[in-house]
Image (tube, rainbow, N blue to C red):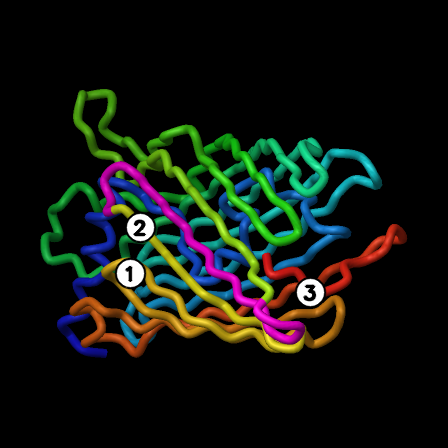
Amino acid sequence: MKNKILAFGLLLLVGYSYAQQDAQFTQYMYNTISVNPAYAGSNVGASLFLLNRSQWVGIDGAPVTTNASIHTPINRSNVGLGLSIINDKIGPSDESTVAIDFSYTLLISDTYKLAFGLKASGNLLNIDFNKLNQYDQNDYSFETNVDNKFSPNVGVGLYLYSDKTYIGLSAPYLLETKHFDKYADVGTNSYIAQERLHYYLIAGHVFDLSTDLKFKPSFLLKTVEGAPLQFDISGNFLINEKFTAGVAYRWDIAVSALVGFQVSDSFFIGYGYDLETTKLANYNSGSHEIFLKYNFFNRFGKVISPRFF
């Protein structure tokens, strides 16, 4: 691996010392529960989701994210429950978050529902400084690893949706937790990672262009203190209720190609490829994201056509 990339872990550490970012997903439209607890139970039956994202392939210590979630409505009630696990590895850090999601849904018109959501989560952070090339062996910041540092959190969300439209606003982690603060007793700010408050706004709509062709534009807006505003916009086509293809753009960062296939009424598989538009593109071969989604339809029936979100 190119020697010039060996400092990558240190650059990541600088980012951790200021504002820790949540994991990002290109195919957020299929993974709404990761950022909005009100999405729990919005499908007809239980839904299982598995995702793996390898970012900036070719760079040592680049982010690798694994996400697994399941959510379901509770019988015919207005309550939905969900469980999600996210593991995010970046350079010397290995972070895992387990969350339980609760939603309560109100029917506000003949076509629209409004869901309120709560998220309760626990985070485990590990940082192994031995994985870094340390240029200053006397730097106290690297003398002690962070081992299984636990921090709880809570989040909230709103999700308004119909069969063809959705819009959601959420803050999945309300507590700004300092994961490591060894020298706090002497008045020195030495924390390595701090959770900052993230706000998410998501929306999308499905247009019926013909009996065999649907089009869904969608966007995600994320804002967090200490990091640039992130704006993702995408457009997907659904052809013959089976094949999905589209493109996405992450503002000033990357362009993406998205494809998916409805293998059966229950099973959907998708893939996304990101190409950097920054100077970082000179040092990596892009980012890969693959996911599997499986719907367990209940005895009350199943959707007439595949869900686009």
Nearer to us: label 3 or label 2: 3
Relative side of 302 to 157, left or right: right
**Magenta stretch prevailing secondary structure:** strand
Ranked by sequence position, the earlier of labels 3 and 1 is 1
The residue that disc 3 covers is 306
Q: Residue 214 lies in magenta, yes or no?
A: yes
Residue type beneath disc 1: Lys
- Residue 226: give x, y in percent of width and height: 23, 40
Q: Is 65 placed above or below 160 here?
A: below
Which residue does the image show at 22% across and 28% down from the upper left? 183
Residue type beneath disc 2: Gln
SS at mark 2 in the image: strand
Within 10 angstroms of label 2, few (less than 14), some, or many (20 or more) residues?
Answer: some
- Residue 154: give x, y in percent of width and height: 51, 30
Magenta stretch bounds: 209-228
Which residue does the image show at 19% across and 21% down from the upper left? 186
Residue 131: mark: 1
Nearer to us: label 3 or label 1: 3
Which residue does the image show at 18% across and 78% down from the upper left? 2
Which corner quadrant of the image does residue 223 belong to? top left
